[in-house]
Amino acid sequence: MSETRFTDQHEWVRIEGDEATIGITKYAAEQLGDVVFVELPEKGRKVGTGGEAAVVESVKAASEVYAPIAGEITGSNDALAADPAKVNADPEGDGWFFKLKIADKGELGKLMSEAQYAEFVKGL
Amino acid sequence: MADTSNESLRRTPLYALHLELGGKMVPFAGYEMPVQYPAGVLKEHLHTRAKAGLFDVSHMGQAFLSGDDPARALERVTPADVAGLKEGMQRYALLLNDNGTIKDDFMVARLAGEAALYLVVNAACKEGDFDYIAGKLKGLATLAPQPDRALLALQGPAAEAVLARHAPDTAKLTFMKVGRFTVAGAPAIVSRSGYTGEDGFEISIEAKDADRVARALLGEPEVLPIGLGARDSLRLEAGLCLYGHDMDETTDPITANLAWSIGKRRKMDKDFPAAEMIMGKLLEGTSQRRVGIRPDGKAPARDGTEIADKTGRVIGKITSGGFGPSLNAPVAMGYVDTPFAGDGNEVMLMVRGKAMPAHTAPMPFVPHGYKRNS
């Protein structure tokens, strides 16, 4: 059973047990345009809530990706190094960024549901 | 992105067409301009290099300069050889401040059989440039800005064939030649030039004809509309400077590696602003120089990135940087201390606190496709 939550920074968080997979939303990928480079965190790194976790660069600009919840990085999507365009092609699937071991499941309650996020994007 | 009140922004005559084409409009140089269309920057860039792209550059400043001898008059503010410019030719020129720093760069053309010179300056600088030129040339020449003219750029290897369908005689032009033609029924000033490194044309037409001419060109199968995003990546790969980034009012022509734009006669006569200083730098060298830079890895280094030597000592700064779609690799240009200015020197780029290895590299990064006189 997995559940996907969203942030106002246009990240998605897929929760499976104690682990979360994180990436940027379709909306974010469209806003960024063609992604040409992604810098991902190393395994074992501890990230705090809102801490810098990754960098995504499009043809136009570089953007930081912040950790939506605190945790320890358990892996990252190495396929993006060779093919960063996966972020545009499948942002909420193959274009995932990193996984982390959730430090405090209580933080998940602050994140938006899919319906709330859809509403949020509509208001932009 | 900064929120800018759209009400204060100007629009080009092609604004409605940009919206119709799905252009993503952003504030640029006081105008609402398309940064990209639905194809996206990457595809627009590659399409321009493969076939042809149409750019709206109507925000740029166009003007005529008339007088007894407008060429000699203009030489008071530029080190380019304007007096020696032959009829039907266009030339790249720097607009200099009294202290020899670069106020702008521009194109100057001498149309066959016409006394007035035709100028095109950068959008962000146009009001300032026009005031400056008019003031400096007061009593010698009269500058007439042309706010009712639009400017299109048709760039890419298919540009010649495309434009020939609407203006057959334009195919006779070679690089940096210019003339008056009729394009899709509209009177036009057409030059074989551009800002992409590709073969191509810049087409100046009256604002009232712009929409019709643009639609005629976009109707050709080879042509896609191209936004400012790809315009920037194309010019960077071509090694062409962006004013305000790669040179500005703190830069002199020699440090900017633009000495080639100073006319031979002008160097001998030393009759341009701060000529002694500039010629001194040409002979004795400068402390820094503008160079091309290729990061060894995949991470782009943006404008403002510090450049260090292998020991970590700062030796310069990136002024333009990003991803080069045609190279599928990051590219940049910037200024480094002169001992590092040769090609192939190892340098470090300080990206997000990390030292990324890079090398100085010759420009253009992508060979120019200009159709020169054979």
Image: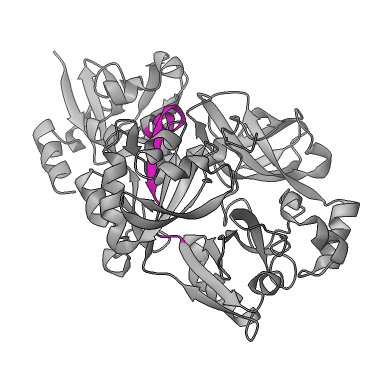
Residue A77 image point, x, y percent: 38, 16
Residue B325 image point, x, y percent: 47, 28
The residue located at (9%, 34%) in the rendering is A115
Q: Is residue B302 left or right of residue B95?
A: left
Decide: is B327 above or below B186.
above
* Closer to the camera in the image, B62 or A35: B62
Residue A5 image point, x, y percent: 18, 29
Query: Would residue A21 be seen by someone viewing this image from the given angle?
Result: no
Q: Is residue B328 magenta?
A: no
The residue located at (22%, 54%) in the rendering is B16
Q: Quadrant of residue B42?
A: top left
Decide: is B45 above or below B114.
above
Query: Would residue B25 be seen by someone viewing this image from the given angle?
Result: yes
Q: Is residue B55 magenta?
A: yes
* Closer to the camera in the image, B259 or B140: B140
Q: Is residue A61 left or right of residue A31?
A: right
Q: Quadrant of residue B139?
A: bottom right
Counting the numbered discs, the total is 0
Looking at the rendering, in which quadrant would you find the C terminus of chain B? top right
Residue B274 image point, x, y percent: 79, 69
Give the magenta range: B44-60
User: Most extreme residue toward the bottom, as rendered?
Assistant: B139
